[in-house]
Amino acid sequence: MEKRQLGNSDLLVSKIGLGCMSLGTDLNKATKIIEAALDGGINYFDTADLYDYGVNEKIVGKVLSSRRDEVIIATKVGNRWNEQKDGWRWDPSKKHIKSAVKESLRRLRTDYIDLYQLHGGTIEDPIDEIIEAFEELKAEGLIRYYGLSSIRPNVIKAFAEKSAVISNMMQYSLLDRRPEELMPVLEKHNISIVTRGSVAKGILSDKFLNEGIQDDYLHYSASELTELIENIKSKLLYDKRTLNEVALQFNLAHNAVRAVVIGSSSVEQLNENIRAAQAAPFEKEELAFLKMITKENIYTTHR
């Protein structure tokens, strides 16, 4: 599978990464999915200390420990579970970041994290302090690089101008094109986009075709979504492409996007996603058609 450089780093990640949040807590099942990902050429695994109270990191660490030098492990920091484990709070303090990384390292069974991401962020956060924490972790050799996982324009711009972040994870799909307005800013600072939500909660997946669309999604009504999918089926050489391919190739068609992180709850689903990512890139006419029939929106808050 094609590997792509993140920012100006030496991290070469597979163009599709495994979003580990959907693995669940069954070790045997998760192991099969992770091993299938490795067999399919995926070297990029994304988790977070928040997922399943840290169990997700433990599973990822256990399964990948014997292949550590072959993979890129990304995790996230900033959210803290309360003692009852029924809710969490946001804590972007330097003290928490430098403490949390040690717990993630322990759960992941590794001496270093390839990509350590701030799991959200607001413009009221102590941004200079956050950057200082990440830079110290780099100097200490506990992380190789750091990035963001944010959809807030004001936060993204602040870190782009003041820090050495190499990537930003953003929800991006045919049905949510808001990140496009920030692509020039991120490209200017050589910050790569890693996308999530590329199948828009399953709407842009082949499984959804037979179930019908009942609910609205972001700026689209259910009827608009139904019409849009029919339009894609009838006019985008749909006899040659699956809907999964359309969804993933739309993301990969943008130079700012270096990888698509997608969750898989079964080996079969994972293999379908790998096939979709390996499909032929869009022709210019196909991409132009998709942009013509979908809505070009921008973020309306956190500006």
Image (spheres, rainbow, N blue to C red):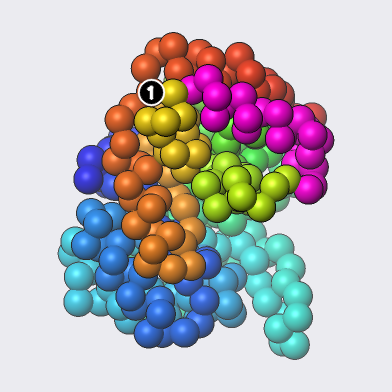
Q: Which residue is mark 1?
A: 282
Q: Within the magenta stretch, is there residue 112? A: no
Category of crowding for the residue at label 1, using alpha-carbon neighbours closer than 10 angstroms: few (below 14), some (14–19), many (at least 20) = some
Query: Hey, which residue is sitting farthest bottom in the picture?
Result: 84
**Image coords of residue 160 (percent x, y):** 52, 33
- Asked which secondary structure carries label 1, the reply is loop
Q: Is residue 223 magenta?
A: yes
Q: Quadrant of the image for the N terminus?
A: top left
Q: In the visual, does 48 lie left or right of 298?
A: left
**Which of the 4 image quarters holds residue 240?**
top left
Decide which of 112, 71 is in the foreground and name it.
71
From the viewer's perspective, tell me whether residue 240 is left or right of residue 290. Answer: left
Which corner quadrant of the image does residue 53 belong to?
A: bottom right
Depicted 105 relative to depicted 190: above or below = below
Q: Is residue 194 above or below residue 201?
A: above
| Residue drawn at 43 percent across, 68 percent down | 266
Q: Is residue 269 above or below residue 291?
A: below
Question: Residue at the location (79% across, 39% down)?
Answer: 222
- Amino acid type at image mark 1: Phe
Span highlighted in magenta in the image = 214-236
Tell me which residue sits at (59%, 31%) in the image: 174
Above or below — where is 19 with respect to 298?
below
Asked whether the viewer can see residue 214, the reply is yes
Q: Dominant secondary structure of the magenta stretch?
A: helix
Q: Tell me where residue 293 appears, x and y as whole percent.
A: 63, 19
Between 119 and 223, which is closer to the camera in this rendering?
223
